[in-house]
Image (cartoon, rainbow, N blue to C red):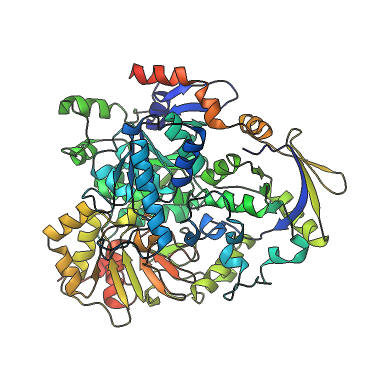
Amino acid sequence: MKPFTVLTGIVAPLEALNVDTDQIIPKQFLKRIERTGYEDFLFFDWRFREDGSLDPDFEMNAARYKGASILLTKDNFGCGSSREHAPWALDNYGFRCILAPSYADIFFNNCFNNGILPIVLPGGVIEQLFKEVRAKDGYQLTVDLPAQQIVKPNGSRIPFDVNLFKKECLINGWDQIGLTLRHEDKIAAFEKRR
Amino acid sequence: MAKNIYEKIWERHVVHEEPGQDAILYIDRHYVHEVTSAQAFEGLRLAGRKVRRPERTFATMDHNIPTTGRSKPIEDPLSQQQVDTLEANCREFGVRCFDMNDPDNGIVHVIGPELGLTQPGMTIVCGDSHTATHGALGALAFGIGTSEVEHVLATQTLLQKKSKTMEVRLTGKLPRGVTSKDVILAIIGKIGTAGGTGYVIEYTGEAVRQMTMEQRLTMCNMTIEAGARAGLVSPDSITFEYLKGRKYLPDKPWDELVAGWSSWASDAGCTYDARVELDVSALEPQVTWGTSPGMVTGINGKTPVLAEIKNANARLAAEKALAYMGLPEGLPMTEVRPNVVYIGSCTNGRIEDLRDAARVAKGYKKAGGVDYVLIVPGSYRVKEQAEAEGLDKIFKSAGFEWREPGCSMCLAMNPDVLEPGDRCAATSNRNFEGRQGKGSRTHLVSPAMAAAAAIKGHFVDVRNWEFK
Ligand code: SF4
C-alpha cells in the first residue's frame, strides 16, 4: 500500500449529503477485474453530460479544482454498497485525503486499505472550509498525518483524530495481510482449539 | 455478567488482541460473489498466497447474470468475463462455487440461510454490504471491501475494532398488511441513514419474536441502510425450526446443535450502548419518496413540503431528491404512479415474499399504465418452490414476467435496467439516484405493496385490498 505522511494539495468541494458509492462510481463500471483505471468513472453521472462532455454545473469540474488531491464534502459520505471501486476511483483520480463530518463504516475502512486518509471534522469546521475553498482560487491545505494536523494557507492549524493503528499502517504503507500473518501461529492455535 | 449476542460472538472469535491495535477476528464463513472478488484473488496470486480455508468459503454468481434464460452466453462480454473469472478463481483456489446453472445458485444472501450455511453464533463476511442479512439467524455478519476479502481469503481473519451496540426494541403486534420491510423502512426514517453508524444493532421485543425467519432476514438485510454494519436477532425456536433439515448443517445430533445455538442468545439483563424503541402496532405500509431510504413516509402520507423542513441541509437534500424523482411537494403517495414494478432481491426475493405478492395479484391483471412487472426469485430453490405452489401461474395470468433468479433490477448490472425517467415500485433496498439505471426513479415498498401498485397503476394501501 502507498504510504501517507504529509500531503499538500488543492481542495475540491462536493456539496452533497449522503453521497453513496453508487454515485461515486456507478455499477456499469464494476464489471472490470482490475484495480486501476477507474479515474474517468468517478462521479460519472454527475461529472459528465449525455454526450460525454464535462458538465459545467458540477462544481468540481471547474478548472480551478484541476489536480485536486483533497476532497471536501458532507455527512455520511460513502454510504451504500461496499464496493471498493469507490476508493479506487477516488485514488485513481488523484484524491488522497477526504474531509467530511462523517462517513459510512465500510467505505471508511476501505479508504485506509487503499492509502486514502478520510478525516472526520466537526460540521462547523467543514462549513468554514467550504467558504474558504470557494473564496480563493487554488486553495490548498497541508495534511500532516504524523502530527495529526491540517495546516491552512494562513498557517492556522486544525487538529484531527485518527485510529492510531490505522495511522501507523498508513504512514508505513503496511500490508495488513503481512501484519496478520505474523500471528499465523495464533490463528492455527485458534483453529485447533475449536 | 449478562452479555448481549454481539459481545458473546465477538469474545469467542478474537484470535489475538494487542492494546492500541485492531483485534484479529476469526471468520467462520466467507461468501464470495463475482463483482467484488476478482481483484482479491489476483492479489493472492501476486503474493503467492493460498486460500487458507477453502472449506469455509462459498462463492455464487448473482449480480451480472441474465434472468431470461441461462442457455446462451451472457451478452455483455464484461459480465461474462467477470463470471468466468470467478469460476476460474474458484477452481484454482479450491472454493465451492454455485455457478449460474447450479440448482443451489441464487443471490448470496438468499442461499446462505437457505442452504444452512449461515448458522447462529458464526462470524460471516462477504464483499457485499447486505451481508447484514445473515444476522437474522443470530450470526455476526457484515460487508467488507475487496482488500478485506483478500485478507480473509489469505488469513481466515479480519482486523476489526469492537463496535458499539444498539438495541432496537420493537413493541406491539404487526398489523395485517404491514411487514418487516415496512418496519425497517420506518426505523431508517426514524434514526436516519447514518443513525446506526459505528453500531451493531440487535433487534429485540415481542414484534421480532413473532416474525418468521424470512421477515427477520428482510429486516436485518436493510440494517446497512440505517448505517449499521450488522443487525442481529437472538436465535430462538423460530430460528431452529427454520434451520431444520438444511443442507449444510454440521453432522451432529439435533439437540446438541440447538443447545449450542441457543447459548448465543443475549442474556436477560444485558446492556447496550444505545437504545431505540418503536411501537409497530400503529405502523402503516411505507413508501419511499426520495433518493435515500430514509426519505420515507406511510402510504397515507405525502411528499414533504420544503418550507416545513427546518434543517437547511435536509431541506436542500429533499429539494434535490424531489427534483430527481420528478415529484411535487405535498403529493399524496397514493397519487404516485410507477410504470415498472420489480419484485425480488436479497431483501424480498424469498418464498414468503412471492406468496405475499401472489396473494394480492391473484385474479387481477396488471394496470395499463404499468409497462412491465418483473418477478425475480432470489434463488433456484425459491423459484422451484414457487412453481410447486403455482405462484408463477398467478403472476403470469396477471401479466407479470416470471424470471430466473439473480440480483436483476436491484442494481441493474445485468440487462434488467430501467430507462431514464422510469418510475419503479421496487422491493429492493436502495433508491439511490441511478441505482436501477441512469435517470431511473425508485420507490421502495414491500412485496404486497408492489404487487398492488402493479394492479392499480398507483400506490394503494394494501391493508384495504380485496383479495380474490
Ligand atoms: S439483490 Fe441487490 S442488494 Fe442484494 S446482493 Fe444483489 S445487488 Fe446487492
**Can you say which quadrant of the picture contains the N terminus of chain B?**
top left
| Residue most extreme to the right | A154
Location of residue A62 in the rendering, given as x and y in whole percent from the top left corner: 73, 66
Taking the view exactly as shown, the residue that stands out farthest to the bottom is: B368
Q: Quadrant of ligand 1?
A: bottom left
Looking at the rendering, in which quadrant would you find the C terminus of chain B? bottom left
Query: Which quadrant of the view contains residue B235?
Result: top left
Vertical side of A90 occupied by B145: above or below: above
- Residue B410: give x, y in percent of width and height: 38, 61
Q: Is residue B51 above or below residue B423?
A: above
Q: Is residue A92 left or right of residue A132?
A: left
With B129 as the anchor, is B244 left or right in this view?
A: left
Residue in view at x 36 percent, y 67 percent: B416
Could you say which is closer to the camera, residue A174 or residue B458?
Answer: A174
Residue B450 shows in the view? yes
Where on the picture, by quarter, is residue A194? top left
Is residue B199 left or right of B426 when viewed as pictured? Answer: right
Number of labels in the image equals 0
Q: Position of residue B53 (x, y in %)?
A: 36, 30
Q: Is residue B5 above or below residue B411?
A: above
| x and y, in percent, of residue B15 in the image | 45, 22
Q: Is residue B272 visible?
A: no
User: With B58 as the anchor, is A134 left or right in this view?
Assistant: right
Task: Looking at the picture, tell me which residue is in the foreground, B121 or A51.
Answer: A51
